[in-house]
Image: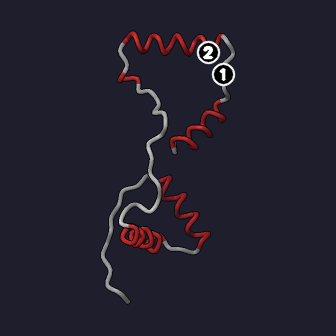
Amino acid sequence: MARTANVFAHVEPEIKEQAEQVLERLGIPMSNAVGMFLRQIVLQRGIPFEMKLPQEIPAAYKSFTKEQFDREIEEGMADIREGRVYPADAVEMEMKRDFGI
């Protein structure tokens, strides 16, 4: 057997559990999957998948001035008055698709 080294990583527990479920169905131990990922980094001389910033970054409250915040709230209220609303589950699906959230 080849000599090995330890890799320690901190990940969100939910992501780890979800990955373990997928890998279990594939019959691949987590350590093998991590090794495969690292080999691909070496072979491709970079991250082995496309990485992009989202096209539109959600606004961060702390970055607003009071005037900007008030304007955003008023625009949101106008949307509600005009019926431009979306079900929460549709917004959640779009956030997951667009931002990986």
Q: Quadrant of residue 93?
A: top right
Q: Give percent across and percent down for residue 55.
A: 49, 37
Report the Cα–Cα distance between label 1 and label 2. 7 Å
Q: Which mark is residue 85?
A: 1
Mark 1–mark 2 CB contact (< 8 Å): yes
Residue 59 drawn above or below residue 45: above
Residue 9 is situated, as x and y percent measured from the top left of the image, at 35, 60
The residue at 64%/31% (across/down) is: 88
The single residue placed furthest to the front in the displayed view is 44
Residue for point 60% across, 71% down = 26
Q: Residue at x 43, y 15 (%)?
A: 69
Q: Give residue 19's position: percent from left, percent from top.
A: 52, 61
Q: Is residue 25 left or right of residue 6?
A: right
- Across and down, in percent, residue 37 comes to 43, 68
Q: Which residue carries the number 2 mark?
A: 79
Question: Are there few (<14), some (14-19), or many (20+) residues within 10 Å of tag 1?
Answer: few
The residue type indicated by label 1 comes to Val
Q: Quadrant of the N terminus?
A: bottom left
- Which numbered disc, 1 or 2, marks the residue that appears first in the sequence? 2
Mark 2 belongs to which amino acid? Answer: Asp
Which one is nearer the viewer's eye here, 50 or 98?
Answer: 50
Q: Secondary structure at mark 1?
A: loop
Q: Up-down: is 99 above or below 69?
A: below
**SS type, badge 2:** helix
Q: Write the residue at 67% across / 12% down.
A: 82
Q: Is residue 51 above or below residue 19?
A: above
Nearer to the camera, 85 or 9: 85
- Left/right placement of residue 99 relative to residue 26 reads left
The label number, if any, that marks residue 53 in the structure image = none
Residue 98's quadrant in the figure?
Answer: top right
Q: Residues within 10 Å of mark 2 (few under 14, many from 20)?
A: few
